[in-house]
Amino acid sequence: MKVLFVYKNAEWMGVEYLSSMLKSAGHETDLVFDPGAGDIEYKIPFVENIFPVKQMMVEKAVQYQPDLIAFSCLTNMWGWVKEMAASFKSRLDVPIIVGGLHPTVMPEAVISYEHIDMICVGEGEDALLELVNSMEAGAIDSNIQNLWFKKEGMVTRNNVRSFRQNLDELPIPDKELFFKYGCFKDRLYTMTARGCPYSCTYCFNDHYKTKTYEGKGAYVRQRNVANVINELKIFMGRYPIKEVFFYDDIFTLNEEWLNTFYGEYKQNIGLPFKCLIKPGTVKSEMAYKLKDAGLVYADVGIESGDEMLRRKHLKRRMSDSTIFETADILKNAGISFTTLNIAGFPGETASQMFKTLRMNQELKPTTALFSTFYPYPGTELGEKVLKKGYISEAGWKKLSAGTGSYRENSVLRLPENETVKWITVFAPILVKVPWLENVCQKLSPNSFWRFITIFFSSPIRNSRIRLFEVLRMYVKTRRELHKNS
Ligand code: B12
Ligand code: SF4
């Protein structure tokens, strides 16, 4: 069977895992990709209109003649997925399936869209393979767990299967799909684990644990070190990899696992690497070993500098001193880090937002990223903003349709919205150059400053890599979509 994946903006490991699963069972897959340069981190619609690729994607799909079109969809991509699904359906009589986070948390909304025939709730490797196998055998089996099917307006909603516990059994991700579109060059993204034991109220993890997968097995699962090293070695042989980014929700969760990892990684891979860290999960000795193994940089989630707000409203049960301790541990070990912060939580006061800025000024991270709180559907805080009237029904509908993002102005009705704008734009600058505060107080947080702040929110090297990635994606995508046309 021929399955055509459709994706936008960035390389996506979820799609790569699905593709490799299908290929290892003998099916054929390909990808049509939209670099969506007007929608990378910040929305710049005119850029998107300068280089339109949507029509080229449809033409490419028509040439490919797939048996199934498969979208992966995050919340902010839902509008684009609908538009593309309609375009494909106008030219091809092929079933369309959508999987990923958005259909997992909003299944009814996604399946009810007219051009979508099936959705996948939760992890999809096994479900998609069973679906494609059934198609090959002659007829779609509508009893496959994790999948919902729509036929003549009637929806079959199947249960979710238990979590696949042994991640080592999965084939390595099919990176080639995205490499040919220029989505990465020498930076390798990988994940050693799936799931997170915490339940922060603004994060999707709680929904997975308590709603989608309740009672379906252990949520946090980690691959063996040997399996991870083997994958990295294979990719080093295929691509000119210069650094590795471990995208586990918290890379420093499992100390025992790390004790095996340090030496294996240093000896067999030896490349600089990056990861995500939650304050309180890294001890001093660990930090030195991580540094010795190659850790050069980490993203550290602070979110709010107000301990009460953190504990009570975000369910991030950590003290201020834990945060300071983690920052000291990283600095002493010589590991650069960016703090991740959010402003504009429902009910958050201006003084609480300034507390986050002040905490960062004391922490002195390499850079600090300040996002606008965005109430993702399906999260505890997302549901709360609707119930408590922080967002209008119309606003919620727009948000569920995928508009807005944590890089834009707040979608909530907050008395402090002007401070949210000001903090998200100027705080990253003021963490680096505190004495500019009086000057920044006089400036308006407009699009110009929003652009400037990018260079203070993550190391310049990251912005440079991303900029080249975007340009490369454009050139290669146009070339790739033009092939055979
Ligand atoms: C790594 C990562 C990134 C990396 C991706 C790098 C890469 N090479 O993959 C980068 C930095 C590019 C990134 C970007 C963004 N990300 Co991100 N990212 C993640 C992270 C940490 C892991 C994603 C992942 O690979 N998971 C593992 C795979 C295996 O899981 P999966 O993608 O869900 O796929 C499985 C299932 O969902 C399902 N499935 C998925 N698609 C499909 C399709 C079909 C047909 C089927 C059957 C099944 C299926 O099967 C897959 C395999 O089991 C998640 C958090 C997390 N832990 O998941 C956030 C996360 C997904 N990101 C998020 C966001 C918001 C973004 C951005 C919009 C941020 C921004 N403003 O720029 C962009 C969007 C990029 C885009 N395409 O437009 C949010 C999404 C929230 C939401 N409700 O939509 C998350 C959940 C973070 C968070 N806690 O809020 N991200
Ligand atoms: S620790 Fe991070 S990944 Fe885990 S639930 Fe909280 S925000 Fe989500």
Image (cartoon, rainbow, N blue to C red):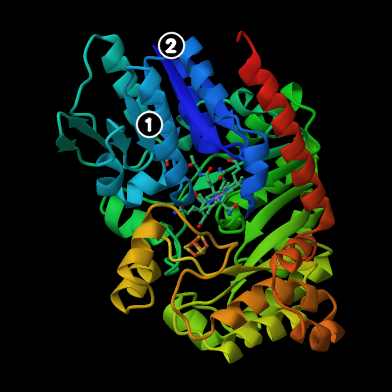
In terms of depth relative to the viewer, which is nearer, 218 or 208? 208
Circle 1 sits on which residue?
A: 86
**Label 1–label 2 contact, CB within 8 A:** no
Q: For label 1, count other residues whose C-alpha is less than 10 Å away and answer few (under 14), some (14-19) or many (20+).
A: some
Residue 161 in view: no
Q: Give me the residue at 77% from left, 85% from top.
A: 442
Location of the N terminus (image quadrant): top left
Circle 2 sits on which residue?
A: 65
Disc 1 residue type? Ala
- How far across and how far down the image is residue 186, in percent? 78, 35
Q: Which secondary structure, mark 2?
A: loop
Residue 407 in view: yes
Q: Which secondary structure, mark 1?
A: helix
Residue 92, above or below 167: above
In terms of depth relative to the viewer, which is nearer, 84 or 244? 84
Viewer-nearest of labels 1 and 2? 1
Q: For label 2, count other residues whose C-alpha is less than 10 Å away and answer few (under 14), some (14-19) or many (20+).
A: some
- How far across and how far down the image is residue 154, in percent? 13, 35
